[in-house]
Structures are given as C-alpha cells and as structure tokens.
Image (cartoon, rainbow, N blue to C red):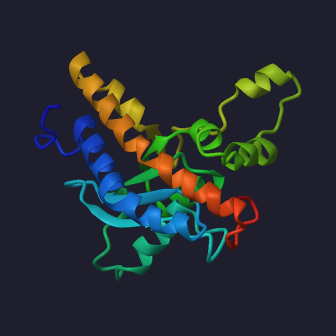
Amino acid sequence: MASAASNPNSPAALLSAMLDVTEQKIVPLTRAGVSSGSKLFGAAVLSRDGLSPLTVATNDERVSPLLHGEINCIQQFFASRPPETRPATADCVFFATHEPCSLCLSGIAWSGFNEFYYLFAYEDSRDLFGIPYDIEILQEVFRVPAPTDTPETLAARPLYNRTNKFFRGRSLSDLVSEIEGEVERRAWKERIEQVKGLYSSLSATYQAGKEAGTDSASVWK
C-alpha cells in the first residue's frame, strides 16, 4: 500500500490511522471490557491535523447502559482536558468501530463532531455479533411510516441520513472505494478484513459471559 504521509486527510491516511488505532489501542481495551461484561464497541477521537489519537474508549455498560463506546469516548474527550487546551470538535475526526446507534449519533451531533467513520455496519452488529438493537431501536422508535408507505417501501428507507446538517458518516469501505488503483484497493480491503477478524474472539468472550450471567447495567444484551 502506498504511503499515507503526504496528505494527512487522504482516504489512505484515514484508513491507516483508524485501522491502526483499532488494532493497537481499541482492541486491547475491548478485550478487557468484554471479559467483564461490556459489549465490544469502541471509539476514538483523532486530530484532523495528523490523525493522532486524542481519546480512545470502549463500552462500559457495567457502570451504565448509556456508556456506549462512542458516548464514553466523547465524555472522556471533554472531561480529560481543560477547555483552553482541548481541540475544537470541528478540528477532529470521530471513529467508531461499529456504526453508531441512535444514542451515539445524537451524542456525535450534540458534541459538534462533523465527520465520523465506522468499521462494522449495523448489519454486522446484528448478524456477526448477535446485537440487533441498533437497527431495532431505529426501526421501532424513529421509523414512522408515511400514509403511502407499504411494508416494502418502509423497509427500503434508510435508517438515518448519513449526510445532514450536523455530520457526514461513512464506512471504511466507502473510503476504500476512493482509493485509486485496483491493487491498492484490494490491499486495503485485506487490511480491513484482518482488523475485523480480531473481533471474532472478542465477540465469543462477550457472548460466553452473557450466557454465564455476567453482571451488567444494560437491559438489552
């Protein structure tokens, strides 16, 4: 893969930074979290200039069902730095390992992060990790049918606007599609799959703990 250093916000640079922070920082935190009953969701705030990680956090539903990975990360970003030394959220890039749920989408918007990326889609959370609630809450709470909707047209409607007044959300696969050259794109796809593969054992640990009745503040496990 070509070097990402020449343009710190190029698709290659973004992919490199977010996959590295996942493998080197988020996964180790997640490993500890799933061992004690928290879900496998994590997040990071990166500086836009240089894409260095400023804050990294994971789900901590042992403490509160609201401490999703993204919300925990946002809270730590604001709590760990005095305002005068904290970068503006508009000068940061937000990364979530899994496509943010409705709670976390609101947290990202209210915090002023205008750009976020994610590794796994909602369907992955449901199908690979046995956690369907991101989709279910958006469908049951927010998806209101129009008078002319049929079940088919309602099901075909996007769950949320990925580009809107508050932010633009994209998957890492979207970034790969912007890479020039088939060889380069294939290399990034392989790198993504390598990092995704780290989550299989994390999911197995979480599911085993859930079946064993590991304590958690979360109602929806």
The answer to which quarter of the image holds residue 64 is bottom right
Q: Please provide percent x and percent y for residue 122.
A: 60, 40
Q: Is residue 28 left or right of residue 109?
A: left
Residue drawn 31% across and 26% down?
178
Residue drawn 36% across and 53% down?
22
- Of all residues, the one furthest to the right in this rendering is 147
* Residue sitting nearer the eye, 45 or 183: 183
* Residue sitting nearer the eye, 208 or 85: 208
Q: Please provide percent x and percent y for residue 144.
A: 81, 38
- Position of 202 relative to 9 (above/below): below
Where is the N terminus found, in terms of image quarters?
top left
Q: Is residue 210 left or right of residue 30?
A: right
Residue drawn 12% across and 37% down?
3
Q: Is residue 112 left or right of residue 66?
A: left
The total of numbered circles placed on residues is: 0
Residue drawn 32% across and 30% down?
190
Q: Is residue 39 left or right of residue 79?
A: right
Q: Please provide percent x and percent y for residue 150.
A: 85, 21
